[in-house]
Each structure stands twice: as structure tokens, then as C-alpha cells.
Amino acid sequence: MDTEVLRTRWVGHQIDDRLPLLEWLGSTGLGDVFRTELPGAQQAVILVSPADAAEELLHNWQIAAALSHPHLLRVFECGRSQVEGSSILYIVTEMPEEALGQILPERPLTAAETREMLPTILDALAYLHGEGLVHGSLEPANILVVGDQLKLSPYTLRPAGPARATDDGPRIYDAPETDAGLLTPASDIWSLGITLVEALTQHRPPWVRNSGRDPLVPPAVPEPFASIARRCLCVDPTQRCPLAEIRALLTAPATAPVAAPAGPAAPSTPHVPLQLPLAYDTAPVTPPAHLLPGAPPLRKSLRALEDDEPRRPFPLPVLIGAAALLFLLIIGVLAYSHRSKPATTLPDDATTGTTENPANPAPDKPQPSGPGPTVKGEVAQRVTPEIPERTARGIHGKVDVKIKLAVDRNGNVTGASILSDGRSRYFANQALEAARKWRFHPAKIHGQPASSTWDLHFVFRPNGTDITPTELTP
């Protein structure tokens, strides 16, 4: 379909006289996506595909509409219709707030976020595979957020087995066996491995299709995700890690690293340098043992080491000599103190308990001043999150995010935390990164710079972002 025609001519039309095409949101490999509205003013999205996309697509959408799982995007309806004389297929689903594919261009996921995301995907895949279905296109663009839940898109669901090739050709998300027109649950496992690496590094793993070799998992991928990705990315589908084993690897306790052999070992395969970002060239650094979760504090660890160290008794002659030297030192100090202390003559009125001359009273000692005046701090440098235009257009209403800042005496941000994420991790993280770059003219107490605490209130809207700073202390 001509995208320009869709943007200018189709917006405002209705499908079946009841599903308005309110706004063009973008395109997918299957068709174009519009914002629509269901009875009761419920917002939804509608994917419109050319009717020549094959009857198989509509059949698969009808299967998806009959499914019910908390981690699958809900399908309201699907069918055939016409727009301006063009025959189309359409599917209506609940409206996602954002997609993983929108977040990764800005930043990778943290290990904690990935650990939270992965069980959701495993649950959805286990449900589909149990129904004899495959997702068929597991990738960041199809991992969506609705409210506080993560969900997979339903557009590519199909029964496991033979599948026709797409006009776009194979992609790295497509397992090697799909070249022969075969889709199985193991194909979804391959896609999961690619997506896992991309989520943690912002890059898909290097791989040469038809080379017969497995993709390379970069060293920047931390454990246990590196082991999971390697087990998923086997060219031989029979060697790929089942979902149950992935879950076991994810929940297994971390093991201590094995000591390296004394001498350098010869590599089993020739070394191929990777043209990857700098982050890939540096392996994760393991923190000192006393900083690991559950480890005792450093002082306690040192005290334990001291308790374990055997104590050797000092020789008796040494103890006697040290005692004699200490006795002579004390006698000398006392004698010197007695000679150097001046004699004191008490006045006749010593009984009054004072030696001050009433005629010449001593000046009053300065008293410590009170809290004194406090001057509030001011914003010296504002940084607004840069939200891609397409992402901003997907905001419906507004997203409120609140960030708390700790500011030192120089006006620099020393700490930042999310007070309210607005039910969107993407916008909360964008606000957090921007807030860390703010600078302030510090508050002053008695003319001296003082540390302070600030709240930043970010309001994201389709047409821009408003930020309201509020100083809480001093």
C-alpha cells in the first residue's frame, strides 16, 4: 500500500461503518497500523493488510482471537472489509503503550529488567506451544507493554509446521530451518536468543547465514543470559534449549568462576575479531567479595580474619623490658610536670570562687549564631529528554514521571531516583537519564553553599515535554 495515500486519504474513513481510522501509527511487514476506537470510547489499534495476503493470514488471526493469556495482546475481532474500493483484511487489538523496539535505540535493558522480562516471554511461548502454535516473529518490535504488563503481539501466530516464505527474505530473527519453509517451537527459541542478546547490548549477535556455525554471543552479555543465548542459538534445532531448561538456567544460583589454567590454552577455533561497540570488548567486572549481596560487611570480614589468625605469645624478657621502660617514662613525665608548673597564689577572697577583677570584667564571649538566613538554590542547566517523534506520537494523554535528586554544595547531582514512573519504564528511564545531567546554583546558609534535595516533575505529551523543578531542602 502507498503510505502517503494511507496517511492522507484513509484517516477519517471507517471500516464496516463502525471502526474509524483515527490516526496512522506506522507500518509492519503485514500492513499498516491505525489508531481506532471501540464502543464506549475504548482506544484500540487496527492492523490493515491487503486482501491478497492470503486466506491463511485471516485464518491465523481467527485462531489468535480465540486465545486468552495475560501475556498475549488481546484480539477484539478480525475480518474482511473494503476501504475506498480496496479489499482488505483487518485485526483489532488492545492498544500497547510502547514496544521494546522503541526502547532499545535509546538504551539497552539492564540485567534486572531482562530477568523480569524473560519469564513473561517464556510463559507466553509455553502457552502457544502447548496449543500447537508458534509465534513466528519474536523480536523487540513485537514485545509490547500494556499497562503494567508485558505482552507479545498476536499478528504472526500460526500453527507449527510448513509456512510460506515472506517476500522480504529471511532475517536474523528467523531460524535457519525457516529457509526450508518450516516453523516449529524450536524456531521461537532461536528468535528468543537473538532478542535476548539485542535487549542487553542493543545489537544483534554476529552471524553469517548458511555458514553452518552458531552466532557469536558477545562477552558483554552477562550470565546467566549468555549461557541461555548460546543454548538458544544452535543452528541444529534439536540442540536448542527447551523452555523449561531456560527457566531453570534463569533461576539457578550464581556459581563462582572457575580458576583459569596456569598456561595459555590454544583456541579450538581460529580467533575472528568482532567489529563491535566498545562495550563488547570489556567483560563484566566482578565486584569484590565483600560487596556481593549477602556478603558480610568489610569490617566484619576483616575482624573474622583477625579471629582466625593464630596469636603468638611475646617472649617473657621482651615483656619485662617493655614494662620497665614504660615505668621510667611515667616517672620522667611526672617529674617534669611538677618542676614546670608555676606556683599559684590565691587572693584573700578566694572563697568567693572567682579570680576575676570586678573593675575590669572580661568581654562577653561571642555566642553561636542561630540558623540565620537561607537562600534557595536555582536551576543552572536544564536537560530535556529527547523522545523520538514516532514514540511521542504514541502517547495518549500524558505520562507523569517524578524524579528525586540529591544536589551537593557545588550544584552537581550526586544521586537520582524514580519516585513515580508514570506506568512507563521507557519514559521513566528517559527522565532519569536527563535529570542526572541537570546543574544547579546551590542553596546557601549564612552565605555558605549547602547541599539540597530537588523533585523534578516530567510531563510527557505528544507535542513535547514539560518539566517542573521543586527544591525540597534546605
Image (cartoon, grey):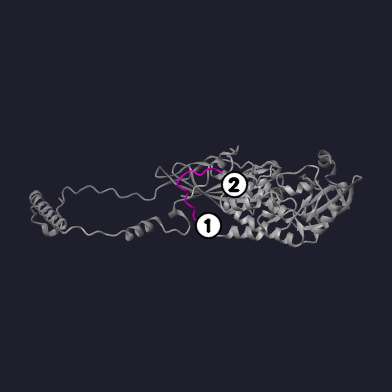
Residue type indicated by callout 1: Ala
Q: Magenta span covers which residues?
A: 253-267
Q: Nearer the viewer, residue 52 or 159?
A: 159
**Residue 293 image position (x, y, % from top left):** 48, 57
Residue 171, quarter of the rendered image = top right
Q: Nearer the viewer, residue 375 or 340?
A: 340
Element type where label 1 sits in the image? loop
For residue 449, side relative to residue 341 (left or right): right
Magenta stretch: includes residue 256: yes
Q: Nearer the viewer, residue 126 or 242?
A: 242
For residue 433, side relative to residue 152 (left or right): left
Residue 320, quarter of the rendered image = bottom left
**Residue 327 image position (x, y, % from top left):** 12, 56
Element type where label 2 sits in the image? helix
Magenta stretch: includes residue 312: no
Q: Which residue is mark 2?
A: 431
Contact (Cβ within 8 Å) of mark 2 with mark 1:
no
For residue 305, side relative to residue 414 (left or right): left
Is residue 137 visible in this depiction of the protein? yes
- The numbered mark, 2 or 1, whose residue comes first in the sequence reads 1
Q: Which residue is mark 1?
A: 254
Q: Nearer the viewer, residue 430 or 162?
A: 162
**Residue 150 image position (x, y, % from top left):** 67, 56
Residue type indicated by callout 2: Ala
